[in-house]
Amino acid sequence: MKYIDEFRDGELARGLAAAIRREARPERTYHLMEFCGGHTHAISRYGLADLLPANVRMVHGPGCPVCVLPIGRIDNAIELAARPGLILCTYADTMRVPASKGLSLLKAKARGADIRMIYSSADALRIAREHPDRDVVFFAIGFETTTPPTAVAIRQVAAEGLANFSVFCNHVLTPAAIANILESPEVRELGTVPLDGFVGPAHVSTVIGSQPYEYFAEEYRRPVVIAGFEPLDVMQAILMLVRQLNDGRAEVENEFTRAVTRDGNLKAKALVADVFELRRTFEWRGLGEVPYSALRIKARYREFDAEARYGIAYRSVPDNKACECGAILRGVKKPADCKAFGTVCTPENPIGSCMVSSEGACAAHYTYGRYRDAVATARAG
Ligand code: SF4
């Protein structure tokens, strides 16, 4: 297949669904976590869950970069933006994530802070070059997919000697988050979140490759199938996971062979290794403090590290009590379990981060499946 619409062919999807129904054993249940928000989005958008038999259940994971940002980090960014003369650059989704005191970056901008929405780290660099008399900070977030462009920006400013540019680094790592979920009490001791296998990330894996997943496939005896973001990719990955579980295998398989190799993008990985190092710990929304799950800027690029330059001090802030984002990001609850879902919390008025980004589970359910969710909740009640 060469073209995108071929990966959205309804007939083929129904054929894969029939194979899953045929091969899923009726005496057992298959709980499969899609780590990535991109997969959550595809499952909701194309109604894939409706094609699956009742004993094949999809569990949403924490792989939405905006969703996992804790409130304290947004507060830090707002404090930075409040500095006189400073320009804060960030991706659009980050603008509406609720922070402390009813604030968000968007509201801070409305109150006069100079916050610019950008599409890439190159945009932030351009703004720094255009305003040599102003401090420009790039609020960098995201998984391994967005880390290499941030590394490129830092190396570029170092080469140019662009002294007014720095990066507030919040890049996080996928394998550490998956291991954290598998180590969580809900999975390990309480068994309240049964997890039999993972649909592995698409874009992240183009950078890191399939090799990093081999550790926990073996250590935790859970199969991983890396999949693209198109509906047939996801259905094929589910079938591959069902087959592995039926065979008692726990291997890393790669459905997304058109983009992912075992070793990933060596050039991008070398760039990241040159600029960043592991943080000892980092707070994730929903997962709490996760050891060695994020990156910070190495000492050799310290002058471009906004945390060092502005002495940013992190304070952990609890989530809004009405919001179930944390439980949703751990796979413990679904969006329809939240009383605020679709009532006080909507994409226009998000209470939590999972309703902000289109990759967030609440936004995906609201946009594509809220009526089904409402019916399911009513039936359960
Ligand atoms: S519906 Fe809104 S309040 Fe509820 S968990 Fe999702 S984002 Fe949080």
Image (tube, rainbow, N blue to C red):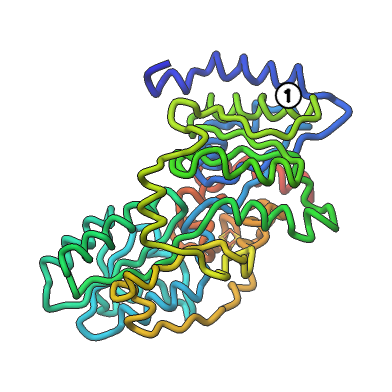
**Along the horizontal axis of the image, is 221 left or right of 282?**
right
Q: x%, y% of residue 317?
A: 56, 78
Neighbours of disc 1 within 10 Å: few (<14), some (14-19), many (20+): some
Q: Residue at x 28, y 55 (%)?
A: 152
User: Where's residue 240, x and y in %?
Assistant: 66, 25
Q: Residue at x 79, y 25 (%)?
A: 247
Q: Position of residue 187 (x, y in %)?
A: 78, 53
Look at the image and tell me whether residue 336 can be seen. no
Indicate the quadrant where residue 163 lies: bottom left
Q: Residue at x 58, y 45 (%)?
A: 212
Q: Quadrant of ligand 1?
A: bottom right
Residue 290 visible to an observer of this rendering: yes
Outermost residue on the right side: it is 27
The count of marks equals: 1
Task: Assign the N terminus to one quadrant of the image.
Answer: top left
- Looking at the image, which is closer to me, 9 or 107? 9
Name which residue type carries label 1. Arg
User: What residue sits 56% from the left and 55% below the top?
Assistant: 342
Q: Nearest the camera: 360 or 129?
A: 129
Give the SS element for disc 1. Answer: helix
| Residue 335 locus on image (x, y percent) | 63, 53
Q: Is mark 1 within 8 Å of ligand 1?
A: no
Q: Which residue is mark 1?
A: 243
Please name whichever residue, 329 or 138, is drawn nearer the observer in this view of the structure.
138
Horizontal relation, residue 317 to residue 55: left or right: left
Q: Is residue 248 above or below residue 194?
A: above
